[in-house]
Image: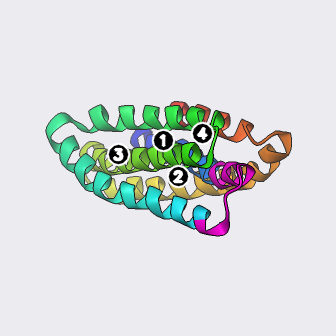
Amino acid sequence: MKDRFYSFLIPWFSDAAFALTGTAAPLLALRFGANAMMLGAMGFAAQLVRIPVCFASGRASENLGRKQIAIPAICVTAAGAIGLASSWSIASVAAFFSLIATSAGMFFPPFQAHIGDVSKPGHLRKNLGAYNLGWCSGGAVAALAAGWLVTIGLPVLPYVAAGAALTA
């Protein structure tokens, strides 16, 4: 049961961080004068960087250990979120957002493999279900909360995202 709880809670907070920064980044870029094409390019570049990192982090976690990759990755998410809060240009927003997307690619493959490693026989299906429920609901709740947090002040979003990442 403890494994299932962590299989839910850790991705809940990590995906909440990603959803909050995913809301903050384009809004910050717009403040600096970004246009629709720039926003699309920013999102594309961030995800393009994430793809090879997913493959590399999975392989690295086989050699170095799951936690040795996942824990620093989620700390990079927090650092990227704090950087995002202090962005000074469209390019800095894009750079920090790409760093956050890269950290997602570093985090999720080792964490998913860790679930497989620690699941007792017959529990993997339920633990993976908790994992999927965790990241989906964490992202959904954070996306909803992001609208409210923006009314407090846009820079609040990345700081809350950093807190969510470190809680994960």
Q: Which residue is mark 3?
A: 106
Estimate the x, y position of residue 131 in percent, counting from the top left. 45, 53
Q: Relative to the observer, which residue lies in front, 83 or 58?
A: 83
60 horizontally vs 136: left or right:
left
Residue 78 located left or right of residue 143: left
> Where is residue 25 shown, x and y percent of the image?
63, 50
Q: Is residue 1 above or below residue 35?
A: above
Counting every numbered tag in the picture gives 4
Q: Secondary structure at mark 1?
A: helix
- Per the picture, the main secondary structure of the magenta-coloured stretch is helix
Q: Nearer the viewer, residue 80 or 37?
A: 37
Give the alpha-carbon distance from disc 1 to disc 4, as whole Å. Answer: 22 Å
Sequence-first tag of 2 and 4? 4
What SS does tag 3 mark?
Answer: helix
Cα distance, mark 2 to mark 1? 8 Å
Q: Residues within 10 Å of mark 1 (few under 14, many from 20)?
A: many
Q: Residue at x 78, y 44 (%)?
A: 149
Start and end of the magenta stretch? 23-37
Question: What's the amino acid at mark 3?
Answer: Met
Around disc 3, counting alpha carbons within 10 Å, would you say few (fewer than 14), some (14 to 19), or many (20 or more)? Answer: many
Can the viewer see residue 48 in this picture? yes
Q: Nearer the viewer, residue 14 or 46?
A: 46
From this view, report whether residue 96 is shown above or below residue 126: above
Alpha carbons under labels 2 and 3: distance apart: 18 Å
Q: Does residue 4 appear in the picture of this structure?
A: no
Residue at the disc numbered 2: 134
Q: In the rendered structure, which amino acid carries the disc numbered 4? A: Leu
Type of residue at label 1?
Ile
